[in-house]
Image (cartoon, helix red, strand yellow):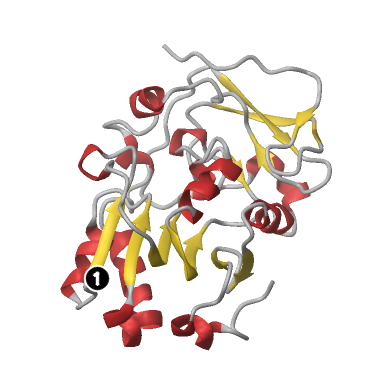
Amino acid sequence: MLSLKPASTEATPCKICRQPAPLFGLVDFNRNCQIPDCVKLPLTGTPVYHRRCSACGFLFTDAFDDWSPDDFKTHIYNGGYLAVDPGYQEARPRSNAGLVQQVFGAHKATLRVLDFGGGNDVLCADLRAAGFPVAITYDPFVPEYAKPPEGKFNLVTCFETLEHMPDPVAGIGAVVANLADPGLVLFSTLLQPQNFDQLGMNWWYVGPRNGHISMFSRDALNKAWRVHGCQTGSFNDNLHVAFRTMPEFAKHLLGRTVA
């Protein structure tokens, strides 16, 4: 049985900038991201209320703030998850591994790679097979890869993970805690589109059944990383980098990203 934190009609502090975040809209718990080949689930009758920050534009729900990791495993990251994210198991991690090889393959001998939130190790297995000497998966929701990694990593990948974080500032802090300095985080999360005010809760990326509970504006994304002393840049609305000091192996990216 689902047990969600009751929604208050009062504005609450934004999880990123602490400015007022009033109620913005709601979707059914079973609302999943509108992507090809995913299963459209029946309504549960359980509304998930979302808030949007009046200052930085961050869209989030606090409905799951009282959940334990076991609650997320039971109700979201369970045996039915693949039905709402069919690319999770193989297609997406293999594509992301190809991206890492394309961008950083020339420097692979010097890289220690951590895939944060990497799920099933497919990405790292592909990198190891391609000659990356150290490529380690960490995902607290997957028992085989839930042991915290040791040491620091000069390249941390974090694909489609930030939007799953109920506390994004703390979650980003956990990513940065594994990052060497100099070092680079290569990550993806889709930013709110320019017409988000018109789309509202109809935006396809809003999907609590997928675990999408934190959705960033560009301002919100920059502020969240800045808490941990990191600059950010973006290739597009989905693919981004963060760093305290830009490492030599990534300096060829300068000029290809926008702040």
Q: Amino acid at mark 1?
A: Leu
Q: Residue 194: image x %, image y %?
A: 74, 59
Q: Residue 214: image x %, image y %?
A: 59, 42
Please give the name of the residue rendered at 68% of the width and 18% of the height, measured from the top-left corner. Answer: 7
5 to the left or right of 51: left
Q: Nearer the viewer, residue 169 or 22?
A: 169
Please give the name of the residue rendered at 42% of the width and 56% of the height, measured from the top-left corner. Answer: 178
26 to the left or right of 113: right
Q: Is residue 144 above or below residue 44?
A: below
Q: Quadrant of residue 115?
A: bottom left
Q: Nearer the viewer, residue 55 or 174?
A: 174
Please give the name of the residue rendered at 47% of the width and 37% of the height, measured from the top-left corner. Answer: 211
**Residue underneath mark 1:** 127
Mark 1 crowdedness (10 Å alpha carbons): few <14, some 14-19, many ≥20 = many
103 to the left or right of 241: left
Q: Residue 223: image x %, image y %?
A: 70, 54
Q: Is residue 222 above or below residue 56?
A: below
Q: Residue 226: image x %, image y %?
A: 67, 57
Q: Secondary structure at mark 1?
A: helix
Q: Quadrant of the C terminus?
A: bottom right
